[in-house]
Amino acid sequence: MLYFSKGSKDTVITSEEMKQGLYEAYAKLGDKKKVLAIPPDFTRYHSKSGELTQYSYEYYKDKLTDILPALGTHFAMTDKEISIMFGKIPKEIFRVHNWKEDLKTLGVVPREFLKEVSEGKVDYEWKAQVNKLLVDGGFDLILSIGQVVPHEVVGMANYNKNIFIGTGGEEGINKSHFLGAAYGMEKMMGRADTPVRKVLNYASDNFAKDLPILYIQTVIRKDESGKLVMCGLFIGDDYECFERAAELSLEVNFQMLDKPLKKIVVYLEPSEFKSTWLGNKSIYRTRMAIEDGGELIVLAPGLKEFGEDKEIDRLIRKYGYRTTPEVLKFVDENEELQNNLSAAAHLIHGSSENRFKITYCPGNISKKEIECVNFSYADLDEMIQKYNPKKMKDGFNTMPDGEEIFYISNPALGLWAYKERFK
């Protein structure tokens, strides 16, 4: 059922309107005794989820007993990040998701289903797991809060991904990532109906009906001045709220180009992007826009590691970002990758498939390390002097020497492609 729906490409939802819409939906639900909120972590700071979580706490007060950020495999949030994103909500009600231990298995999606939806690309079952707090916590309302935006693993982020991946387990995260990579990112990104989404929907429909989940979905765009604004808010307990948000996100977060781009420069905000695990959104989101033989330059002042998990970091350093056939061969031949399919998927996601050059300009990783994972290296200070983020605007820029580049200030907020590649 849809409890609140507002949004269009021209809509701007103010903080007060956001609060009113949220309260309108909560009033329709009736009284609740114990509430759990599952917002994203700091890597989704721009989603407006922090603000929505604060309003939810104001509404339910001490009935909102627990907040479980949907970390997936990410690091736990720091006290500073919690304060910035969630304001004055008491820190003692925040919980940390442990993706390797804090789990409850709801059911298993059969291998026949995965083989069918992947068109034979994978042949394994998928374990639907969530943090045990969702099942054992005695909640009569679970708020799943987050932004719908084009995504490399599932096609469009959020909805039940927030539950089964954000609070999911190692096996489910690994296998879902690998399913999307093996099927092909360019057949996934910007699409709501994908093999990974079909698997998540199967889990929702068959194993999670007893969980009292309310989905609060936002759509964010940049206005004419470059400011981030909410243009969509959809609240409901089934697929419809996600479907409406996905349709709007595709309209406002997807830039279709008439021709491929020769050079793209992407800036990674240092407080948000500290690893290539996240920073490679610069690759995922632009790969359909770059011409063969072109170049992607990634300005990454906060970059200090490859994987946010020590084992994944080790695997990235060992195997490097390779073409899909090479990574699939590595998986066939190496048990350590078979046991960590999300790392294998990430290696595929970070590859240009030898179509274009990827040049990383890191703040805290050496030239040797960058080149060892098969990226090209350039000095950050020199490249920022040449491509100054403070002087460029999003989109096409002509440099003093006449060079034309396409600049992106935050790759997490959109998807770019040229028409012939997105079909």
Image: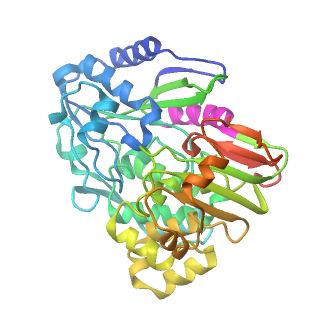
Q: Position of residue 389 (x, y in %)?
A: 61, 40
Q: Looking at the rendering, which quadrant does residue 63 occupy?
A: top left
At horizontal 43% and vertical 11% (from top left) the residue drawn is 16
Q: Horizontal placement of 278 versus 402: left or right?
A: left
Magenta-tinted stretch: 238-254
Whether residue 112 is visible here, answered yes or no, is no
What secondary structure is the magenta-colored segment mainly?
A: helix
Residue 52's place in the image compared with 380, above or below, is above
In the picture, measured across the screen, residue 180 lies left or right of residue 136, that is right
Q: Is residue 72 visible?
A: yes
242 is within the stretch colored magenta: yes
**Colouring of the image:** rainbow
Looking at the picture, how far across and down is residue 160, in whole percent? 43, 44
Residue 190 is inside the magenta segment: no
Please give the name of the residue rendered at 38% of the width and 25% of the height, measured from the top-left corner.
Answer: 52
Q: Position of residue 322 (x, y in %)?
A: 59, 74
